Every structure is written in structure tokens, then in C-alpha cells.
Amino acid sequence: MKYLFVFLLTTANFLFCLQAGYSQSKPTPPDNRPWNADWIAAPFDAGNSYGVYYFRKSINLATKPLSFIIHVSADNRYKLFVNGTLVSLGPARGDTYFWNYETVDLAPYLIAGKNTVAALVWNEAQFRPEAQISVRTAFIIQGNSAIEEILNTNNTWKCIHDAGHQPIPGYFFAASKGEMVDMNQAVKSDWKSVDYDDSTWPFAAKVMGGTLKGMSWGIDWALVPSTLPAREMTYQRIPKLHSAVGMNVPPTFPGEKTQVTIPANSTVTLLLDQTFETNAYVTLNFSGGKDAGISLGYAEALFDKGSRATRKSNRNDVDGKVFVGRIDSLIADGSQGQSFTTLNFRTFRYIRLIVNTKNDPLTIHDLYGTFTGYPFKRTAVFNTDNTEIKQILDIGWRTARLNAWETYTDCPYYEQLQYIGDTRIQALISYYNTNDDRLARNALTLMDHSRIAEGVTRSCYPTKGTQIISTFSLWYICMLHDYWMYRNDSNFIKDKLVGERAVLDFFSKYQQPDGSLKDTPYWAFVDWAGNLAGQVKGKDGSAPIYDLQLLWAYQWAAEMEAKIGLPDFVRIYNEKATQLKGTIQRKYWDPTKKLYADTKEKTGFSQHVNSLAILTGMVSDADMPAMAKRILADSTLTQCTIYFKYYLHQALIKAGLGNDYMNWLDVWRNNIKMGLTTWAEVSDLYYTRSDCHAWGASPNIEFFRTVLGVDSYAPGFAKIKVEPHLGTLTNVSGDIPHPNGKVSVSYKLVGKSVKSESPKVAATNVLAKNNLNYGKWQINISLPGKTSGILVWKTKIYVLKAGANSFLI
């Protein structure tokens, strides 16, 4: 990792105008007429090397149009501008069999007279992110009708390669690399503007015709309309300057737009703090500084000095720390009005800016970010005076947002991959916190596309590689069941049942005669905990952690097949589930410890195995509470990390311990104490790699599902079960989004306990209790239309109807 400490002096110029006018039309159904636009690229360019390319075309309009709809895509990525204003980013990542295009109405940005449509297209080639599938560099626009076809890409467009851009390879192996930009070689002036002179630019070359999916027997990009909305783009200042070495800097920089001039022949290092983790396109505007070197580094946290960049202590501390992170580097060309914006967003809390001037001073005019992410709107509400709950929910929401882009991602800084194990929890967070399930639907569709010929899914998708975590295919079946239960669209899931059957058929090939899995191939990851991160198995090649996941998948699949699938599969899966339950009980139950062991030899035990045993019905209702208490109390068990605590907590809640939920949140409390503003990947906060992993945001599910108690009680959320677990809380309320509107609940304890009172006061309070329902719960529940449900309060069940329901219990 030595190169991360090298001050890289390089790279080129482009101006990315991130303006408030950025918008993108909602997807419109394709009319299925053949496209007559071409995929175009720079002339005499093979399209398989790293490169940044600019495309332009000017048109004249007699009047400002009311509507001007185009469809646009590129390989790898594009930024589309109209008259200098950014109007679209894309394409949303997919694969070559489902290559997305965005639909954009350009009318708000067009004027009567001359207009220029321009695009920045880049191909990171061998340095591209792991999630980026690619054919070659290319760009395409198709007009929606004959009028808009004036913008169809063909040889009337111009295109030029910007020679100033080169990549900075780095150890962040799966995400975007850094950029090296030499302003001396870059395209000059504002190439997006109407007045820019492109007379020396060559005309673009045709790569091939654009073809919609299913309209040709052999194509490189099978075009489909993106189902996702435009990403959020929000201006964001960097509020804090921690240190300045080499000169004094105005105290208002960079929190306010402040000019800073670095003298000639100087080296200045600034450490900036966003104060919370973010995803943002970073923009640096500057002038002068001929041949000055500029380095922009981005880090989630600083590392402890002397730890070889492996140990991180409190994330708020900067003294005694070293900076290690992704780097962008520039060489200034000495001109006025130079500007750099990252091609891809950067994830960071800290930014280190180093400027090394030569004989010419360099003036920084501004440095800021533009936050980006999937445009989720938080509609869930949890009302409480408990500030800790609010803080946990806010950090969890930030964590979820930073891991939602054009797909869900495991972490925004290192990998940016949509892993199924992570995504199951992320999708549930979306269901409980927003009214928007489009990203979840997109995830389920991509995972279905990822299945290989053997039937199993890839561990993450989209991806240019083929990593298989076989256990994640079982979580995919659980994800299908989750969507089926929480969203009213059974036809969407019905279309995915073929994939569910293929996954279960894959696993059936590795089942022994007793049903137990043996030597399942690929990576059998469960959790970053002991040997559960790799392949745990006994001498016979089996282990209950895999059998239990398969058992749960059979149970979920049987439920879906019974309602929307085929009866034969219901019978098959139920038979297999029954057999597995018997085998697990016989092979792995330890009557002495009264727990299920990790292997047949019974030499190790884990919270993981016993949590899944409760969740899959291996444990009777009568035995669950005692077993759950053993899982919590026995520190010799392999402990769940922050990820698998989601399943541990579900088991404890099922066992009747839900009122203790607030007592189980120490790992989240430790994150807060350590200065994290998003949840870390694992529970060891000193040595966790990623500081932002959405699989740790499960409290953003459980404060609504467990504490407020709102859960689906039938497919499509058609029936609602309300079973609160309030613990010591005595006055809470909230709203949870629902396909038909929202569910609102409130719980308030009327009165309080009487302690150490005088006889007169006690008599008064007894009278109040008798006359004013002293010490009872006022419960109000509102269900959306076309729903019904039940309230479970202690041992009693109360019927709920659509609309308002009130109880004094």
C-alpha cells in the first residue's frame, strides 16, 4: 500500500456542472419500435482502453418545445448536458442482456434558437469497478419520435478523446479507482456550452446500430428501459478544517466559499472533515499554479500511527493519526477558471488536500461536494423522547442511504457490490422506512439474472466476475418471500419462482440420503465470525448451519408455491423440510448443553446455529424462552457480529424476549462511542475494514417491527399484526409505510406507579386510579383501507379493522 502515501502529480480537466436543475424523466413504457440511432464512439478508437470522451451536437429550434423526450445510454458511464446543465447520469448498471437506458425530457433546458447537447462518456476499462459490466466505449441517444430524432446519435455528432485523463490504480479492488488529470493536456474551455468552438473536433464513428432487447438474434447491448428514478444530487459544503500545514488558511474555508491562495514554491497540506460519512462528487475550482501538483485524498477514517494502516480508534480523533485513502491527483496548467469534478462519487468523511506549487501561486476558489444516492424519502416516523433511539435510527438511515445507488451496495467505499446477504436486510429497511420498492424490485430482478447454469445465483450482481456464495442463494429465496409478504405484487414474485426452484434443485444435488447437505461447493460464508466465514463442516462433510438455511428456504418456498405456484412443489418442499428437521435434531442436538452443535462431533457451538433453529421451528414454543436465554448467556458460543445479530434478535423475539430489545444494542452503542456516523462492517471497531455497511442497520427495521410491533400477517401486507415490545418505554408512537397508505400506532401509559407516598397522597392516587383508569395503556392504531389485522397485547388478541382502532387496556 506504499503508493497510497505517494504524492501523485497528474491529470486533466473537465467541468461537471452540478446544478439544481438536474432531473431525469420517469421511465416510460417502450413503444417497441426499432431504434434507428447508432452506438457511436471516437474515430479510430478500439474502445477497450481507459479513456474520457466528449460528445457534442448543436441543433436549432424555431420555438421552445413543450416536450422533447430522448432515450440515452452509454458504456461504461455518461453525464448528459443540455446548454451546459447536467440533465442525466447513467446508465443504471445491469448486464449486456439487460442494458439500461434512461428516458429524459430535455424540454425544460432547451430554448428557441441554437442548443447544444453534450455528453461526457468514460470507460475505466481494466480499472473499472467490479460491478461494471462492459463491451467497449460507446454512446447512444434515440429520439422518442420523429421530431426528437434530430438528436439521434450518428456521424453528425462530434467526439474527442481527452488525453489528460489517466487512472490511478489502487488497492480498493472492487470500487472506482482514482483519477490522474493533467490540465496541460486536457480539453480547454467549457466544451459543454453553446458557444464552444468544436470545429476542430472529428466526427464520431459508428460502432453498431442500437437494438432493443429481443429485436435481434445477436447484439452486444440488449437495450431495456431503466426502472429507476434519477439519483439525488444535493449541494453539500465541507464544514470543518482540522489542520493546515504550510500556511495560514482563512477560518471560513471550506465551510463557506472562500478564496485561498497558496504562494509559489510552497507545499500546503489541509485536513478537512465532512463531520459525517457521505457519498459525493467532489469539485475543486482553482486558477493559476502553472505545473502545480494537487492531491485530493478521501478516507472514511484515519488510522492509528504505527499500526501499518490497519487499526482505527475513535473516528473523531485526528491527532496521532495517519491518512490512507483513495487519491485523485491533478497538474494545474496555470490558466484561470480551472475546474475538476470526480467522474464517480467519492465516499469519505475526511479529505486531505495537498498543493505543491512551482514558480506560480495557485488560488483555490472553492471546494465542495454534491451528495448523491438513490432518492429515497424517509416516510417512517418513530416518535419518542429517547434521544438514543433517535440517534440510532438516524445513523442507520444514513448508512442505508449511502449503500443505495443504482443498486444496493455492501459498502460505498471499498466494493460497491450488491451482495444478497446484505441486500436482504437493506430491502427490508426500504419496506419499513419508505414507500419506494423500486430498488428492491431491481435487486430481485438482477439476482434472478445472475443465476448460472447450475441454478445457483452469484453472490453479488451485477459483477464482471463470478463469485458464488452458495448460502446467499438461500437468502435470495427469503428475499422473494419478504417482498411477497410486504408488497402487494404477487405476480412479480410468481415470475421469479422458476429461479427459486432452480436454486433448490442445485442444493438437492448435495443432499445426502438423510437430507443433510454435504460438501456444498463454492464459498459457504455465514458471518465474519470464526470459522463461519469459511467452510465449517464435520468429518462427514456436513454442518447444521447450512441445513438450517436450506430448511428455512424450503419453508418459505413452500408457502409461496402454495399460494402462487405449483402444488407439486409444495408437497416436495414440505417433505424435504420434514426430513431435514428430523435429521438436524438427530445429528446436532446436544442434550447436555441443550443446544444445537456446529457439527456432528459437537465440539463447537454458535449463536448462529441456535438462532436459526428457533426461527425454523426446530424448538417448541415451551422450550424457546429457556434456549434463547442460554444463547444470550453462554459467552463460549461463537458470537454473532453486527450482521447476523439481525437473525439472533429475530430468534430472541420469537422466543418471547422482545421486551428486552433495547438491551441488545451494545454493538450500536459502541459504534456511537467510537465516533462512527455509519455502522461498521463487523463488531470489532478497531479492525473493521468498512465503516459503512448497511447490513448493520437492522434497528431501522426492528424499532418499527418489534418495538412498535407492526408486521405483515398475510401476503401483500393484506393483514397486519401489531404486537409491540415496549420494554421500559411508556409513551411512543409512529407511522410505517404500507402499500395502501400507512399504519399508525401510539402507546401511552396513563399515570405512573405510586412510591413512598403519604397516606393522604396514596388515597388520592388510588381514587384517581379507580376513576381515571390510572396505570392503563391508551393504545391507538390506524390501519389503511382494504386491510384488517390483530393486536396482540400480552396473552390477548384484539381484532383490528381498517381505519381507527382505540383501546384502553
Image (tube, rainbow, N blue to C red):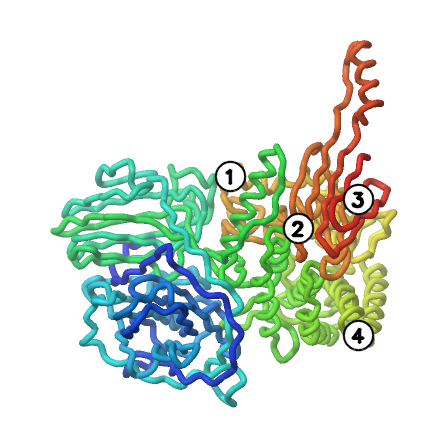
In 3D space, how far apart are the residues under numbered discs 4 and 3 (Cα atoms)? 32 Å
Q: Amino acid at mark 4?
A: Phe
> Given this view, does label 2 or label 4 mark the residue nearer the observer?
2
Q: Is residue 604 visible?
A: no
In this figure, which residue is indicated by the disc labeled 4? 569
Across and down, in percent, residue 334 comes to: 15, 56
| First reached walking from the N terminus: tag 1 or tag 4 | 4
| First reached walking from the N terminus: tag 1 or tag 2 | 1
Q: Quadrant of the C terminus?
A: top right
Residue nearer the viewer, 255 or 193: 193
> Given this view, does label 1 or label 2 mark the residue nearer the observer?
2
Across and down, in percent, residue 724 comes to: 74, 42
Q: What label does residue 656 carry, if any?
A: 3
Residue 533 drawn above or below residue 628? below
Across and down, in percent, residue 225 comes to: 50, 73
Q: Secondary structure at mark 4?
A: helix
In 3D space, how far apart are the residues under numbered discs 2 and 3 (Cα atoms)? 27 Å
Residue 459: quarter of image: bottom right
Residue nearer the viewer, 734 or 348: 734
**Tag 4: Cα neighbours inside 10 Å, few (<14), some, or many (≥20)?**
some
Residues at badges 1 and 3 in contact (C-beta under 8 Å)?
no
| First reached walking from the N terminus: tag 2 or tag 3 | 3
Q: Amino acid at mark 1?
A: Met
> Given this view, does label 2 or label 3 mark the residue nearer the observer?
2
| First reached walking from the N terminus: tag 2 or tag 4 | 4
In this figure, which residue is indicated by the disc labeled 2? 742
Q: Amino acid at mark 2?
A: Lys
> Given this view, does label 1 or label 3 mark the residue nearer the observer?
3
